[in-house]
Image (cartoon, helix red, strand yellow):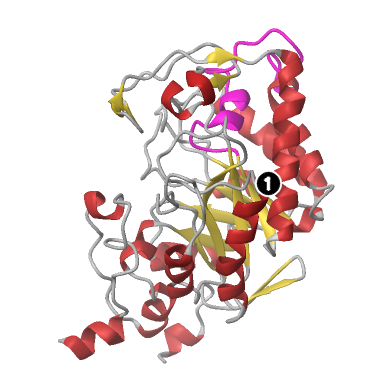
Amino acid sequence: MTETTTLSSLLSPFDLKGLPLKNRVVMAPMTRARAGEERMPNALMAEYYAQRSSAGLIITEATVISKQANGWQQSPGIYSDSQAEAWKQVVDKLHSVGTPIFLQLWHCGRASHSSFQENGQLPVAPSAIAIDGDYIHTPIGKQPYQTPRALETEEIPGIVEDYRRAAERAKSAGFDGVEIHGANGYLIDEFLESKTNHRSDRYGGSLENRYRFLQEIVEAVVTVFPANRVGVRLSPNGNYNDMGSPDFRETFLYVAEQLDSYGLAYLHVMDGLGFGFHELGEPMTLSEFRSVFKSPLIGNCGYTQESAEAAIASGDADLIAFGRPFISNPDLVERFANGWPLSPPADVKVWSSFEAEGYTDFPAYEENSKVN
């Protein structure tokens, strides 16, 4: 090891509120669509996560909390006892090598289609505002986005309960914690942002009201897992799924400040712009969130080893999550530690298939060297 590597902040251990991490590299949640039409975790998924177990912490791909939450083909679920049981093979494989894993809880909201829904119902959202986009991939092929149905006030507690029950199943499967997916234009983000929340009830209008849905979810989930085993993910700069509101800075600083009071495991902020930027002002930075959120902060989106080191050394971040680099570099941490080059990014058509190809067939650096 070089002197630079020895002094690495990124590769140093971290105490995540009592959960020891062997390094500060987080495997970011990435939708990988290998759970089949039954949305059932399986041995292929267990192998995929185990290949990447040198990460300090793994956050699973987004996992739907109910049938209504579906909006992506062959993504896994956590809304049945059999799904929870099937997740155990993933958790056990990671725990056998000492890697903690959190499950990301997901509701797609308006980023869905009637072909995903029971009885062909419309997807739901805070308000009846459609995504302005080309199409969505559905079980019946590419389809135009639909105008969602606005949730009735009395329906919302039932969705909060779906999150709580999903957390219970995650706990029964042995997960170390859960991450509440409040980013990327899915249901929670739709409630938070003024662009997509035009409600006039207690869940809309003011910042306090738009935050209420996430607040109720957090308070439900922390009855299952202690707060120091619950994270939240936000995407203040993102335009994915047609998001971005003029009051984004005020909104997300308020949300982070409110979340700070719970003593959460972490706040996971997509501060990078590689996933799309709404261009409604200067991008929000981790340092802004650090000023209002005192628990651990995870930065994410487009980081290199060098920029990750800098973010941790400056104190702006405690951990950095890597997404796409982990697809083609299952041994990403080892490559960082040894100065080995990264494999080129995988082709999107390959990584978005439903098979082992583009999933578990990327070689580790040393294996690749032996072949060559």
Magenta segment includes 205: yes
Give, as a three-letter code, the residue at label 1.
Ser
User: x, y percentage for residue 38?
Assistant: 48, 46
206 or 84, which lies in front?
A: 84
> Which picture quadrant has residue 327?
bottom left
At horizontal 60% and vertical 81% (from top left) the residue drawn is 96
Give the residues drawn in magenta, as a range.
182-208
At horizontal 42% and vertical 57% (from top left) the residue drawn is 323
Report the residue that reaches farthest toward the right: 223
The residue wearing badge 1 is 291
In the rendered view, does 137 fall on the left or right side of 281? Answer: left
User: x, y percentage for residue 139?
Assistant: 36, 33
Q: Main secondary structure of the magenta part?
A: loop
Q: In this view, does 1 lie above or below 343?
A: below
At horizontal 59% and vertical 60% (from top left) the residue drawn is 87
Q: Is residue 36 above or below residue 94?
A: above
At horizontal 57% and vertical 68% (from top left) the residue drawn is 89
In the rendered view, does 278 fall on the left or right side of 189? Answer: left
Q: In this view, does 102 lie above or below 136?
A: below
**Pointer 1 local density, CA inside 10 Å: few below 14, some 14–19, many at least 20:** few
Question: Can the viewer see residue 48 in this picture?
Answer: yes
Task: Check disc 1 and report its element: helix, strand or loop.
Answer: loop
